[in-house]
Image: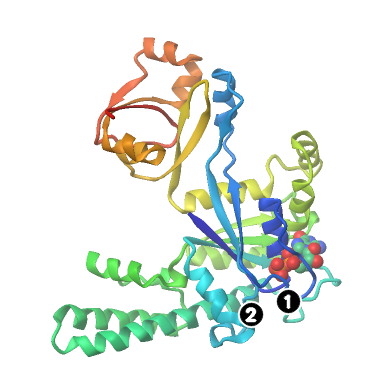
Amino acid sequence: MKLGIVGLPNVGKSTLFNSLTKGGAESANYPFCTIDPNVGVVTVPDERLQVLGDMYQTKKIVPAVIEFVDIAGLVKGASKGEGLGNQFLANIREVDAIVHVVRCFEDTNIVHVDGSINPLRDIETINLELIFSDLEILERRIAKATKLARNDKAAAKELGFLEKIKAHLEEGKLAKTFAEVADEEEQEWLNSYNLLTYKPVIYAANVGEEDLADDGASNAGVKAVREYAQAENSEVFVVSAGIEQELAELDADEKKEFLEDLGLSESGLEKLITASYHILGLISYLTAGEPEVRAWTITKGTKAPGAAGKIHTDFERGFIRAEVVSYDDLVACGSNAAAKEKGLVRLEGKEYVVKDGDVILFRFNV
Ligand code: GDP
């Protein structure tokens, strides 16, 4: 699963990406500084893993991961090829969801490409490029469907559908707010177009340190972003990329202290990673034993054999049953043996839908 970090130049994307991955992406005070998309693998914070690690007395803890791509260089005109724009747009097409970084911090030393701080204008600039790019895709589809429509009823129906979405986008609206999907067939079509403006979005409002304690409530820009996002059903997270960069340099104890000084319990990035995981419809089930405690990523709704297949395809093929205890029950009982005694370890079959926090032992044939 991949998330793309997008936004105008100089809004803090690379800074955020660097603190996410503690990697080596370059951050500099000029546009187009990061031309190649940078990919970083980020662990998903999950306090349950350490608790289970202590219970099973294991040091090997393997958290779930999620991939972030720093997609630099989207500018006004990108869909027309400005500033390598088409390449960036193609990179966005490959991600599962978008983190849209919006500059809400004031800093006269850092140039804004449009000369002033105006988060709403920035969002609209980026979204308009995404819309233009989607329109191109739709036009190609329309040309194809038009040719087929004379002899093909399904193509004729799809043509009508395509025209409706196109009209929607031409009003400057995002595909995700298109509400006229009539049936499953249309839904499948819409999914298959892979439109940029149909992807889930999280807005990361990048604020100065002074706006962190009240979660951006007194920052007019953040307020505007929140209103905008609400209208399209997207989430907003307030972060300070600058602070996150400092936090990324610290060890766990120092970090906790620094956060307390700022009046925070959790870093903005942790919240952002957790939210990204949820927005992608992902959950974690856990495996626990002496060799290791581990979180495994599955899509909500995955059944037991599919979940087993994440560990090894043999587990899926030879699936017999799953021994499942919920994390809360396991922790309340203190050990797997105690949970068994209380009848809280269930035997589940092929149709069992795995839940977030299930601690599972799979039984399988080889
Ligand atoms: P990008 O072009 O969107 O990737 O932006 P960068 O991450 O390279 O940041 C551009 C400039 O803004 C750099 O000089 C950063 O140090 C600075 N910057 C990023 N985030 C913040 C922030 O939260 N506060 C302040 N004051 N500066 C920031």
Q: What amino acid does circle 2 point to?
A: Val
The percent position of residue 328, horizontal first and vertical second, equals: 47, 25
**Left-right relation of 265 to 359:** right
Identify the secondary structure beneath mark 1: loop
Identify the secondary structure beneath mark 2: loop
Does the beta carbon of the residue at mark 1 sit less than 8 Å from ligand 1? yes
Q: Quadrant of ligand 1?
A: bottom right
Residue 348 seen in render: yes
The residue located at (83%, 68%) in the rendering is: 107
| Label 1 Cα crowd, 10 Å radius (few <14 / some 14-19 / many 20+) | some
The percent position of residue 148, horizontal first and vertical second, equals: 20, 86
The residue located at (49%, 63%) in the rendering is: 95
**Left-right relation of 282 to 181:** right
Q: Are marks 1 and 2 in contact (CB under 8 Å)?
A: yes
Q: Is residue 103 above or below residue 24?
A: below
The residue located at (23%, 68%) in the rendering is: 185
* Quadrant of the snapshot with the C terminus: top left
Q: Which mark is residue 175?
A: none
Front residue of 18 and 335: 18
Residue 183 seen in render: no
Q: What amino acid does circle 1 point to?
A: Pro
Q: Which residue is mark 2?
A: 75
| Label 2 Cα crowd, 10 Å radius (few <14 / some 14-19 / many 20+) | many
Q: Is residue 60 above or below residue 11?
A: above
The percent position of residue 327, horizontal first and vertical second, equals: 46, 26
- Extreme front residue here? 366
The residue located at (70%, 76%) in the rendering is: 32
How many numbered discs sit on the rendered protein? 2
Q: Which residue is mark 1?
A: 31
**Left-right relation of 317 to 14:** left
